[in-house]
Amino acid sequence: MRGFILSRLGQSALVLLVMSFVIYGLIGLMPGDPLDVMLASTPGVTAEGVARLRAIYGLDQPLMLRYFHWLVAALQGDFGYSRTHSVPVLEVLAPALVTTCRLMLISFVLAVTLSFLLGITAALRPGGWLDGVISLGAFAGISVPVFWLALMMILVFAVELHWLPASGADTVGDGSLLDRARHLVMPVATLALASTGGFTRFIRASMIETLRMDHIRTARARGNPPWRVVMVHALRNAMIPVLTVIALSFGSLFSGALLTETMFGQPGMGKLIYDAILANDFNLALSGLLFATLITLLANLAADLAYAWLDPRIKL
Amino acid sequence: MRFRLLRVACIAATLLATTIQVHARDTLTIGLSSFPTQFHPAADPEAVKSYIEGFALRPVTAFDATWHNTCLLCSELPSQDADTVEIEERPPGLPGMAVTVKLRGGLKWGDGVPVTTKDLAFTAKVGHDPQSGFANTRTWGKVESVEIIDDLTAIMHLDEVSSEFDRIDQLLPEHLEGPIYEKAGAVEYLHQSLYNRAPTTPGLWNGPFLLSQISNNNTVVLTPNPYWSGTKPQIQRIVLRAVENTASLLATLMAGDVDMTPGEGVGLSVDQALTLARTQPTKFDYVFRPSLGFDHIDLQLDNPILADVRVRRALLAAIDRPTITVKLFDGKFQLADSFVSPLEPIFDKGVEGISYDPSLARKLLAQAGWQKGPGGICHDAQGHRLTVEFRTSAGAKLRELMQQVIQSDWKKVCVETVIHNELPRALFGETLKKRIFTGAVMYAWSFPVQSSPRQIMGSDQVPTAENNYSGTNYPDWHSDVADQAIKTIETEIDPAKRQEAWQAIQRAYAEDLPSLPLFHRVEIHLIPRFLHGLVPTGHNDISVLWAEDWRMDP
């Protein structure tokens, strides 16, 4: 087990290295350079002024050289300064990472819990009216764009009913746990509902297949109560393919978080990375994307470990 | 006994009601569509940063709502009449200027330290240092040295004669930023500056409000500066909250979570504000303020078709601008004949514009050798089609609509248009910057009041690889009249001579049409009915510079 984990961590490091090179190169290929935005809004900048600013920000060096300098510093734990924020990258990333992880984890737990409840319920009577309702809801969840769902929620619960705040992370001057929780309700619900549809469909399909297997029939024949057959014998087997889907969904959960954060004014990683890319803030965009990659890689590692726990036949 | 109880209850109820009312109206919450990436006033100019910092950090001078230059931190504007400006000789034998700056007495930073000429000298020193990373060197780049006379009087020595000698930006607090600059050095200064490391430090701000709280990278709370010596602000707390999706911002406004959004380009989009004005006419006081935003179409003058001024004039005559402004902008955008706003004192009323006249357009095209041919498209004698590539920012909804209308208008006079829109980043970062467009590009620009048009019209401002792609004379317009006028505008300190130069360049522009003038934009301000005293300016020195005059109904 230890060897497997070390090997996977080594692979993850290699993936991160390759990703850093690819992302740096791709950002470098984008039109314009980091000074364009600044210069566009600064009348009267001379050619000398442009050259001076390029030299200050190191933009007069070739892209590969800049990447090499960044890599050497990053390996020593120095991710550099954010050009747009003028503070060390980690100081900008840390609070955003906390916001995004909080949003993602709560949404993730909610989505998985809901999906299991709905998926199993639907699988118990495939073709029944409850299965029909759940499937319809799941399809709706898959089909509805996140931004539309977010906007509808704001219009209903904030504009019309005034039950919840329309945006932001807390109320100035309050900031209590309850206040923060109220601000999280709509973003979490939006992100969770966006994932629940897909998860529910997978769990339903996997459970239906598992419930038809011989060992389930045997378990029933041995007189096990129905809840035990479903929750102990069937669910454990059905979870293995579902885990893969859930682990892989972390990436899309991240991109969903971008939309949700933007719509609900939550200052998270998604928006930060998006702005950094638009502003050509190399250090910030690169570090943000690498953290996002790292989260997805760790989620996949966790899924692999979960396989072994669920099915002892799987050797790591 | 019963009567006494009743009286106590009445008094308590009254007090409670008063308390509730006071609480309900001591805070003004403003929704913004973006949030600053940093708070150093001289780095990375961002409209939203100017908006937020306008409450807390005053420039020495600013143009007011009547578009006249006024003193905010000074006691009088430098002028020749007051003998506070003189031309002087600099060591290489070139002319420079000595500008006497007189600061207003009693001004203090938010920590109680007086604002003095030491701050002026320090800001000039940092701003003049090419390594400091100042993006905006408009004021300080030309200040060679500052001679301190006393705490409130100093002479700025400029390395050139500049007509903008009386425009002076914000000051930095020497007592706080000076030691940091000395210790960190110019290159590291911005990284170590308190504006970025601890922007809620009271001593960084000298306006009526202080940035007292910044949270979640989307909220700034302003509270009154106890050391502010001007009119005491009535508003006890201003909360500025960013909701970066404008649809969400609109919903947040409608939900009442924010009281207003600014009209200065950091709030709702123009179409959202117009829709709101139509659908909720009584919810806010809507102020439509003509602004310096100028919508126009740049033309590629290297293209032989567009190099012919008759074609350019025909293209302008073919656009039904009156209908566009009525249908798309509720008639609020003003038709433009000059690149200068009619509200500017330098606007030339004698400029002859070209009105909507399709028959004139056809006539001009015929004179240029273009005749209607197969498919209703003009052809020249060699059989070439009159096709113009037309670009604008993808995703700018109203501009894309306007583009489609113009395409249709041009089609009516037999000009074929190929639309090729790009994301702003590609359009401005590559296509315009490297001049790789072949036809027309529609966008808007906004410059400070009466600022030199060199960057957009000077023949030395055509972006090329040799000049590091600086300058925004994208059409590649070369005009001796314009170049001479720009030189006069920048260096002549006699206002009458400058006025003549402004007149000359506006007429040269209207005759040559290197770009097609479309509209002067308006700012749409949604002011809550309980708020008074907010006067939109329409230019870069925005309304918040006078926020101490804002009053809220109880």
Image: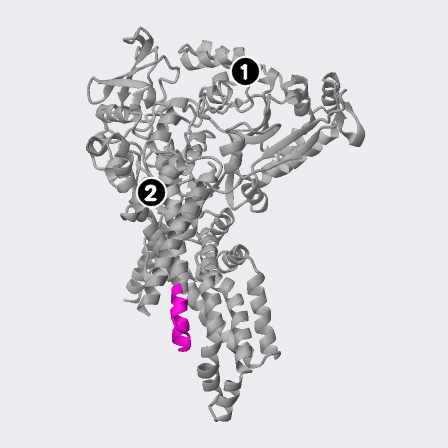
Judge whether residue A92 is colored magenta: no
Q: Residue B552: which quarter of the image?
A: top left
Dot 1: chain letter: B
Residue B328 image offset from top left, x and y in percent: 62, 37
Mark 1 Cα-neighbour bin, 10 Å: few <14, some 14–19, many ≥20: some
The numbered mark at residue B478 is: 1
* Residue labelled with disc 2: A70
Residue B188 image offset from top left, x and y in percent: 26, 34
Q: Which residues are magenta?
A: A301-316
Q: Total number of numbered labels?
A: 2
Q: Residue at x 28, y 48 (%)?
A: A77
What main secondary structure does the magenta stretch of the protein show? helix
Residue at the limit of the structure toward the right, as seen here: B374
User: Label 1 is placed on what type of residue?
Assistant: His
Q: Is residue A163 visible?
A: no
Q: How is the image coloured?
A: one colour
Q: Which of the pair A177/B410 is nearer the observer?
A: B410
Dot 2: chain letter: A
Q: Residue at x 41, y 50 (%)?
A: A19
